Image (tube, rainbow, N blue to C red):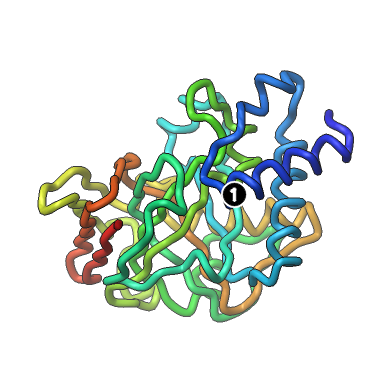
Amino acid sequence: MMDDATRTAIADELVEAEKTGVPIPLITARYPGMTVEDSYAIQGIWKQRGIDAGRRLVGRKIGLTSKVMQVATGITEPDYGIIFDDMVYETGSVIDIDQFINTRIEVELAFVLGKPLSGPHATITDVLDATAYVMPALEILSAHIEMEGRTIVDTISDNAAMGAMVIGGNPVKPTDVDLRWISALLYRNETIEESGVAAAVLNHPAAGVHWLANKIHAHGDSMAAGEIILAGSFTRPMWVYKGDTVHADYGPLGSITCQFV
């Protein structure tokens, strides 16, 4: 495990990478013995740097929720990061792509909590009870660490690659639809690139949310009413570039559109 000084130094490297747009060298290449615990500690320091700078925590993201991604990364559970207020865009936004590095898009559902949610024994039923509404969302991935050779512990340190999110469509109460069967078509520049169904997220998109509630309880944390929880992608990441227009069609739940400039 790393000492506190090393963890702090890496967190500050990531803060600087976010400002400059220049990714840092692989952390695991420099510290081969790095652990998941180290990664979340680094993420926590990075989070505190943001709060100290005036950023406001508005939610969390859950990643690596599909079986294929867990096998690819050699882990057996998802990971998580945090969402600041300046990371949230509305559908129709024109977004400066230069604020991100290695920009990709994922199709997700966002759970907006109407009640607090906490572990240690949270269930899917607790998630549905605590959720005010569910709405379509796109996650914008941004890698502040070199991509080649990157491992799960690198990614967790980098706030689980959370760059920003775009929300829109038609919000629904979680009991008004079968969340497992919500589907989406993802387009780039009017060409369909990906499609998926929400059951690909741990068999139910709420499953990742209750996993997160129980996971952060061990760190003395919980989720507050009003938080936005990105529940995990049900498509592969799609690369986007300057000038691209992205459109996600969620059928009865509406659509999301954004443009990168």
Quadrant holding the C terminus: bottom left
Q: Residue at x 73, y 46 (%)?
A: 12
Above or below, comparing residue 163 to residue 5 in the picture: below
What is the count of numbered marks? 1
For the question of whether residue 8 can be seen, the reply is yes
The answer to whether residue 96 is left or right of residue 9 is: left
Q: Residue at x 64, y 61 (%)?
A: 122
| Residue at the left extreme, as displayed | 190
Say above or below: 176 vs 42: below
Quarter the N terminus occupies: top right
Mark 1 belongs to which amino acid? Tyr
Front residue of 251/7: it is: 7
Q: Which residue is mark 1?
A: 80
Image x and y of residue 41, in percent? 77, 44
Left or right of 43 in this view: 115:
left
Q: Position of residue 177 (x, y in %)?
A: 30, 70
In the depicted view, which residue is nearer to us: 125 or 47?
47
**Going by the image, does 141 lie left or right of 246?**
right
Residue at the image position 11 percent from the left and 48 percent from the top: 191
Residue 49 image position (x, y, % from top left): 74, 58
Residue lying furthest front = 20
**Dot 1 crowding, Cα within 10 Å, few <14, some 14–19, many 20+:** many
Left or right position of 132 against 258:
right
Find numbered disc 1 in the image and state the secondary structure of the residue it sits on: strand
